[in-house]
Amino acid sequence: MADQGFMKARQTKFSAFLAGYLLVVLAILGAVNYLANRYNKTKDLTETKLYTLSEQTVKIAHNLKDDVKIYYFDEAERWTESRFGPSPKDQLTRYANLSPKITVQYVDPRRTPKLARDMNISTLGTVIVETGGRHEEARGLTEQEITNAMIRALKPNKRTACFLTGNGEHDLENTKADGFSALKQMLEGANFIVKPVSLLERTPAVPSDCTVLVVGGPKNDFVSVEIDAIKKFVEGGGRALFMLDPLTKGVDTTALTKMLDEWSVSVNDDLVVDLSGLGQLYGTDEFSPLVASYEDHVIGRDLKGTGTLFPLARSVVPGPVRGGVTVEKLFSTTSKSFAVKDFRSGKIAIDPKRDTAGPINMGVAAIYNIPAPPNAAPDAPKAANGRFVVTGSSRFVTNSTLGFPGGNKDLLLNMMNWLCNDEDLISIRPKDVEDRRLQLNQSQMSRILLTNVFGLPLLIILVAVLVWWKRR
């Protein structure tokens, strides 16, 4: 009887322990399930961060003031289909996880044709971004296209980039290496209207709809009416980007650099030569200096650690302070570089006594502070100050260089957004998805078939038979 009582007591304790253990396990599983539903966290282990959204997308999502709804129109069975990279549902879920203000709705046009008709959906696989009653269609399923659609919906007011013509500047329609066609396409994708303008007219003036005036690598010097029109534009609160190349054969921008000198910016008559050898890693030479150091200005702050390439560049530094203009450095080359004064002979001979040793600054950002009228009331609203950026090269955004695997695109767009007062868009943007699929020929495929499909299984079977035979 005593033994039976002891066994029952032992079974009771075991049962209680087992029940408690199961309750703890169930509680842990419930907590994990709750947290997994509430906080969707993933870790991207791919080399190119294929499944990670860019800093720009994260920044926009975290700064949202209005709700954003993303619609994806496609057949239900294709929502999770993935040929290369994330599936549509995976991609859009990442947006929803960034902010509670972003929601995603997946729509099968066959089941809800009215919604598809109301939004003028004519193609399957279409993404629509909606906010504040505005709708913008993404031109694709990549992060860059979806984020650009979000920007267009959040900032409906078009910005106009006016590219100056008439002085040998790079052509917006030129698709060759030295053209600006890729730059035009990139700016249009970033919600800019891009158009050429000329100041060689009877009554020269920068058009009133120009948000930013871009002077992209002129070869011929400017006449006085052009200089006067640019000065009036910037000193009246306008925005301008000057990209000026070294004064090599056939290039003369003396009048323009003299105007910038009046605004406390020195565009020097030299050529930057980089002897660090970093450019050779990207297939370039010493005449394409690599920028790897950025100042704390908002334009380059997020680019630290990212390289940008500046083929055939000259140095640009803050000049003597002249009232009303605030100038800040933007970026510079490595310490193993020189700004060479004697470079037109064709033979570059560095003279440490005459030439400037690196780091060499090649870009500045400046604010033209418009003074208040003499009789203005103390509480009167102030006029918007002018802004301008000057770089020592225009070739860093030509078709041959804009796609450099570094920060050239980001740097240019950061300049444009700063000039437009859109600092909230300044960041590192989505990179183009790199196709890293393994390409195999027929011989390699046959080898893999013989070794992995037939060879390894047969080897395992053979080893198993030998073990069995020995044990027998």
Image (cartoon, helix red, strand yellow):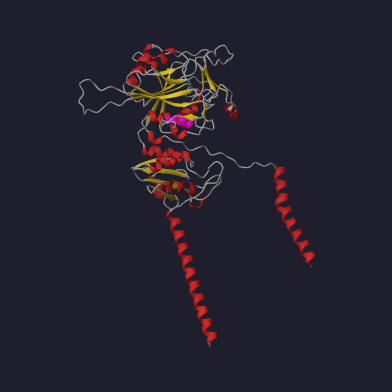
Residue in the image at 58% along x and 40% along y:
435
Q: Is residue 237 left or right of residue 186?
A: left
| Residue 350 falls in image quadrant | top right
Given residues 458 and 157, the one toward you in this image is 458
Q: Position of residue 85 (x, y in %)?
A: 54, 45
Given residues 27 and 238, the one toward you in this image is 27
Q: Is residue 215 left or right of residue 2?
A: left
Vertical arrangement, residue 395 with respect to residue 269, above or below: below
Q: Is residue 258 left or right of residue 86?
A: left
Vertical arrangement, residue 131 with respect to residue 271, above or below: below
Q: Is residue 470 left or right of residue 267?
A: right
Find out whether residue 430 is within the magenta segment: no
Q: Position of residue 174 (x, y in %)?
A: 51, 23
Q: Position of residue 222 (x, y in %)?
A: 42, 13
Residue in the image at 53% along x and 39% along y:
433
Is residue 138 in sight in this rendering? no
Q: Position of residue 186 (x, y in %)?
A: 46, 31
Vertical arrangement, residue 436 with respect to residue 452, above or below: above
Given residues 194 and 100, the one toward you in this image is 100
Vertical arrangement, residue 295 with respect to residue 168, above or below: below
State how many labels appear.
Answer: 0
Given residues 253 and 218, the one toward you in this image is 253
| Residue 221 falls in image quadrant | top left
Magenta residue span? 409-414
| Magenta span dominant secondary structure | helix
